[in-house]
C-alpha cells in the first residue's frame, strides 16, 4: 500500500533526534519530517482549541493546512506538496477528510498491517 519511496525515508525517531541534535540528515528526511510535524501541529492545535469533544474539520481547514505546510516548506527552500509524490499524497489525502488525524492514522495502520501480514513476510 505504501510506495517504496515513502517507506525508504519515512520520518523515524533516529532521524528526528538527529535533526534536533543538529546532525546532518538528507534533504528528503528533513522535508518529510517537516511535513509530518507541520501536519500534526496544524490539526492538533485546531483540536485543542475546539470546545467540542470530537473535532471535525471545517471545509476550509484542509486547504489552510496545506497552505500552512507549503509556506513552511517554501520558507525552508523545499518544494511544495505535490500530489504526484507518494509521501505528500498521504497528507493531501488526509487533509481532505472530516477527521484528518484519524484518516492519517488509519491509512498508516492499514499500510503497516498489510506490510506485516504473513503473506507479505519474507520467506
Image (cartoon, helix red, strand yellow):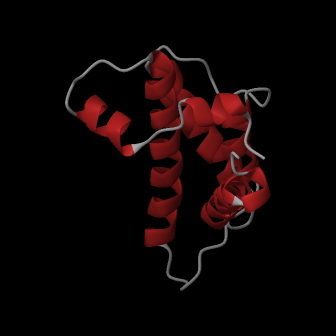
| Residue 60 appears in view | no
- 1 or 24, which lies in front? 1
Relative to the observer, which residue lies in front, 90 or 75?
90
Percent position of residue 40, x then y: 49, 53
Q: From the viewer's side, name the closer residue of 118 and 8.
A: 118
Residue 61, position in %: x, y? Answer: 65, 54
Q: Is residue 99 left or right of residue 83?
A: left
Q: Within the image, what quadrant is residue 104 found in?
A: bottom right
At 79% from the left and 56% from the top, the residue drawn is: 119
Q: Residue furthest left?
A: 21
- Left-right relation of 71 to 3: left
Tell me if residue 83 comes above or below residue 65 in the rendering. above
Left or right: 115 in relation to 35: right
Pick out the residue farthest to the top. 77
- Percent coordinates x, y for residue 54 in the rendering: 59, 81
Asked whether the viewer can see residue 5, the reply is yes
Task: Spot the residue most to the front.
Answer: 123
State how many labels appear. 0
Identify which residue is drawn at 46% across, 17% down. Answer: 27
Residue at point 30% right, 30% down?
A: 19
Q: Position of residue 10 (x, y in %)?
A: 54, 37
Amino acid at each position: 500500500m505504501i510506495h517504496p519511496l515513502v517507506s525508504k525515508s519515512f520520518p523515524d525517531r533516529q532521524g528526528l533526534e538527529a535533526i534536533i541534535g543538529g546532525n546532518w540528515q538528507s534533504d528528503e528526511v528533513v522535508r518529510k519530517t517537516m511535513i509530518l510535524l507541520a501536519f500534526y501541529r496544524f490539526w492538533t492545535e485546531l483540536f485543542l482549541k475546539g470546545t467540542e469533544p470530537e473535532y471535525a474539520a471545517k471545509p476550509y481547514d484542509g486547504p489552510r493546512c496545506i497552505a500552512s505546510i507549503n509556506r513552511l516548506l517554501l520558507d525552508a527552500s523545499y518544494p511544495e506538496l505535490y500530489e504526484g509524490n507518494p509521501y505528500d499524497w498521504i497528507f493531501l489525502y488526509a487533509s481532505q477528510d472530516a477527521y484528518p488525524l484519524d484518516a492519517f492514522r488509519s491509512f498508516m495502520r492499514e499500510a503497516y498491517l498489510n506490510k506485516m501480514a504473513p503473506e507479505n513476510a519474507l520467506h
